[in-house]
Amino acid sequence: MLKFLSKVKIEFNALDPRTAACMEFLAQCNARTAKESNPSCQLLVKRRTDSFPPQISVTFVNGVEETFDATSTPAQTIRKMILEKGQQLETEQMFREAGEKWPVIIPEEELRQSFPGTKPRKAEDKKQ
């Protein structure tokens, strides 16, 4: 998960009962395998003393920053969203390295074409 991120900032009040997602996400970020996937990712923890709601902010390697409300979003959901965005970044990078334009624009007429599909052959048909 961390390989797609350059910075993670977790803010919470330790006495706030809504910090479960922050604590779980922090544990995931501190895991050995996560740290090894991107040692240069900055992990910042801000322990607050006010009633500010817990939040997790992440900065992707392309500079895009996203903030999640940790009171209503479970850590697994945040992790899943990061992985989905990361796969999109990998795809974009792969296209750019191949010299293709990004985003890929599919002409309208190709979108409307029917797809004939494929029919699997039976073993008997293959022998003939």
Image: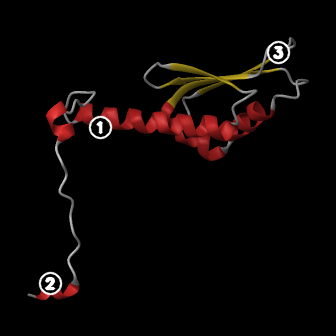
Q: Which residue is mark 3?
A: 48
Residue drawn at point x = 12 percent, y = 88 percent: 127
Tag 1's secondary structure?
Answer: helix
Q: Quadrant of the C terminus?
A: bottom left
Q: Looking at the image, is mark 2 or mark 3 nearer the viewer?
A: 2
Image quarter in which the N terminus is found: top right
Please tell me whether residue 121 is drawn above or below residue 118 in the rendered image: below
Which is nearer the eye, 46 or 121? Answer: 121
Q: Which residue is mark 1?
A: 94
The tag earlier along the polypeptide, 2 or 3, is: 3
Query: Seen in the image, is 41 located left or right of residue 105?
Result: right
10 Å crowding of disc 1: few (<14), some (14-19), many (20+)? few
Q: Residue at x 82, y 15 (%)?
A: 48
The image shows residue 78 at horizontal and vertical percentages of 62, 34
Q: Which residue is mark 2?
A: 125
Amino acid type shown at disc 1: Met
Distance between mark 3 and mark 1 Cα atoms: 40 Å
Q: Residue at x 19, y 52 (%)?
A: 115
